[in-house]
Amino acid sequence: MAEESNGAFIRNIAEVPWREFANHFGGALSKPLVMPETAGSRRIDYRISMYQPMAYVARHHHKVQEQVYHVLEGEGLMEIAGKNHVVRKHDVVFLPPGVEHAIANSGLTDLVFLVVTSPVTDDEKPL
């Protein structure tokens, strides 16, 4: 990793270990590339996720956080407010605060996607 004294850095994705976060099941893995614990970020949580077939995150919502999902490979089902949508390569999903959602790999190969979340915690006051 190349790191500057001002906090900027260049990191290769291979340097970051896979993790299975809480409420993620069946091989729903993520690499926390930029978040407070891994990069000292204050406003952005940026991850790449890889879900094996049948892996999923439990239905949930965020009080103040916004999220963007960007599917890179595979296909799955994105549940948004009780309605299922097929998502696949090049689909981008925006989730405002308060919208219940879940994602599951319903395909035959790994589902790979980016997730950007802001702010980094869900305990701030709503705007």
Image (tube, rainbow, N blue to C red):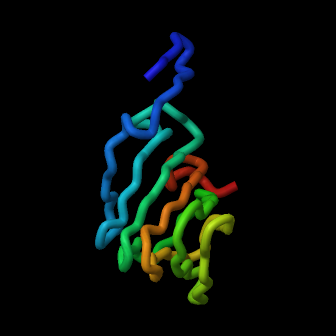
Instruction: Give me the residue at 38% from left, 76% from top.
Output: 53
Quadrant location of the C terminus in the rendered image: bottom right
Compared with 21, 81 (above or below) is below
Percent across and percent down for residue 77 are 53, 81
Compared with 8, 59 (above or below) is below
Instruction: Give me the residue at 33% from left, 58% from top.
Output: 21
Q: Nearer the viewer, residue 70 or 67?
A: 70
Snapshot quadrant of residue 71? bottom right
Residue closest to the far bottom: 83
Instruction: Give me the residue at 37% from left, 39% from top.
Output: 16
Snapshot quadrant of residue 26? bottom left
Snapshot quadrant of residue 25? bottom left
Locate residue 87 relative to residue 5 in the image: left or right: right
Quadrant location of the N terminus in the rendered image: top left
Q: Nearer the viewer, residue 72 or 60?
A: 72
Residue closest to the far front: 108
Q: Is residue 81 visible?
A: yes
Residue closest to the far top: 5
Percent across and percent down for residue 69 are 60, 62
Percent across and percent down for residue 76 are 52, 78
Instruction: Give me the residue at 36% from left, 65% from top.
Output: 28
Compared with 34, 106 (above or below) is below
Q: Is residue 94 visible?
A: no
Tally the marks.
Answer: 0
Percent across and percent down for residue 34 are 50, 39
Locate residue 34 relative to residue 28 in the image: left or right: right
Q: Nearer the viewer, residue 39 or 10?
A: 10
